[in-house]
């Protein structure tokens, strides 16, 4: 090789340099090629879901922190993120039929859908109060409640909203403790059976009842005073309230307390729970079937069930370890139900709660 002419050696050296340069350039080019985009994770452990509504046996809408709205039409096997137009928290979603629904949220937000939750538009409530709950009995009549004892009411489907302040309507002289509890408590939930009968639950154990569509509200929580609760300030905050057409209702709240009424909310007593351990964590949301059976969910993965009317509530298992809070439970019928909560948790059952399946992420 070394006996070859110098010109040949130079040419071969040049060729080797060119080939090496080409390989280096092409190799660098491959490194710089962008990686394929990963599919967006619609559900992550950072999600906080506050409520779920079932539109039919397959379709559900979930709302939560950061203005997030998710919709499934196949029992949770796939999800679509629906634009909400806001990054504020959305707390409650309610539908009166398969098409028309409302969402309430932070800073006076009320959103309305007329296409089964595929799109949402904002309604003007004329308040910036956090609205923790909204409830409609038909396409026109609805209430939303929240901060500072404020509520908004509509009789035209939300085209116009009227601002109200719900407080003691008894007209009686208040004790010092009662006066403290009267200082604009937060209202956490509202529920109506029809255009006349409605209830509101809230901070300091507030339990309000109306029988005239909300023209007047009557405070009923003092009926809970007795051997177990001796002071009005010991009445726990109630986060959720619901009634059956037979005027049986429950309110659930702090310290695992459940209040029960059998007369339409005029009087209340603490309900019984069958459990090996005393409940101390908050309960957030009840769901009652017309016969008085139902479910309750709460903090630390707590789930209670009443399978037989009139029997005590019993702790039940979801079939998995749940270390987060559960914020809402709803049922389409006695077989198909949903539960949502923290860490992006969405659970679905199609066999009456014997087996719960996590939604695909």
Image: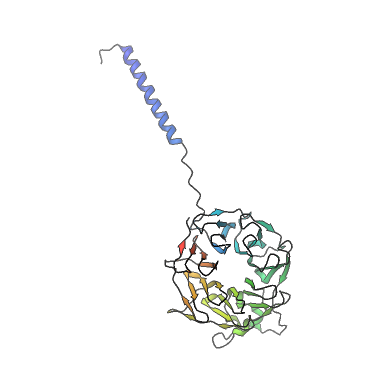
Can I make out residue 186 in this image? Answer: no
Q: Quadrant of the N terminus?
A: top left
Residue 318 percent location from the top left of the image: 44, 68
Residue 61 percent location from the top left of the image: 57, 60
Q: Relative to residue 122, is residue 56 drawn left or right?
A: left
At horizontal 60% and vertical 64% (from top left) the residue drawn is: 91
- The residue nearer to you, when weighing 1 against 322, is 322
Can I make out residue 47 in this image? Answer: yes
- The residue nearer to you, when weighing 130 against 90, is 90
Residue 143 percent location from the top left of the image: 68, 68
Color theme of the render: rainbow
Q: Quadrant of residue 221 in the image?
A: bottom right
At horizontal 73% and vertical 75% (from top left) the residue drawn is: 215
Residue 308 percent location from the top left of the image: 50, 79
Q: Quadrant of residue 15 in the image?
A: top left
| Residue 39 vertical placement versus 227 (above, below) | above
Spot the residue most to the bottom. Answer: 227
Q: Relative to residue 193, is residue 49 drawn left or right?
A: left
| Residue 265 vertical placement versus 361 (above, below) | below
Q: Quadrant of residue 275 in the image?
A: bottom left
User: How many discs mark residues in the rendered view?
Assistant: 0
């Amino acid at each position: 090789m070394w006996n070859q002419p110098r010109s040949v050696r130079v040419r071969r050296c040049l060729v080797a340099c060119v080939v090496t340069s080409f390989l280096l350039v092409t190799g660098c080019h491959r490194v710089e090629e962008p990686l394929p985009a990963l599919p967006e994770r619609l559900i992550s452990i950072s999600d906080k879901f506050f409520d779920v509504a079932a539109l039919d046996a397959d379709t559900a809408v979930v709302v939560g922190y950061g203005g997030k709205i998710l919709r499934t039409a196949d029992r949770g096997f796939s999800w679509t993120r629906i634009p909400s137009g806001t990054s504020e928290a959305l707390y409650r979603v309610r539908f009166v039929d398969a098409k028309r629904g409302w969402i309430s949220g932070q800073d006076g937000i009320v959103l309305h859908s007329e296409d089964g939750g595929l799109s949402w538009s904002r309604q003007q409530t004329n308040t910036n109060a956090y609205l923790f709950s909204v409830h409609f009995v038909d396409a026109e009549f609805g209430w939303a409640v929240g901060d500072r004892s404020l509520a908004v009411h509509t009789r035209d489907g939300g085209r116009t909203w009227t601002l109200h302040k719900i407080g003691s309507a008894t007209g009686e002289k208040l004790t010092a403790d009662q006066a403290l509890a009267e200082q604009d408590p937060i209202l956490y939930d509202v529920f109506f059976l029809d255009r006349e009968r409605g209830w509101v639950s809230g901070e300091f154990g507030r339990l309000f009842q109306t029988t005239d569509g909300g023209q007047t509200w009557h405070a009923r929580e003092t009926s809970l005073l007795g051997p177990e609760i001796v002071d009005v300030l010991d009445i726990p905050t109630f986060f959720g309230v619901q009634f059956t057409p037979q005027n049986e209702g429950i309110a659930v709240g702090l310290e695992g307390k459940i209040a029960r009424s059998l007369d339409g909310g005029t009087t209340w007593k603490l309900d019984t729970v069958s459990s090996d351990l005393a409940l101390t964590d908050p309960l957030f949301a009840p769901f009652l079937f017309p016969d008085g059976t139902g479910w309750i969910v709460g903090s630390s993965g707590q789930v209670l069930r009443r399978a037989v009317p009139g029997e005590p509530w019993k702790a039940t298992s979801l079939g998995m370890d749940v270390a987060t809070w559960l914020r809402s439970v709803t049922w389409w019928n006695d077989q198909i139900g949903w539960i949502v909560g923290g860490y992006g948790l969405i659970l679905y059952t199609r066999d009456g709660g014997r087996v719960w399946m996590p939604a695909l992420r």
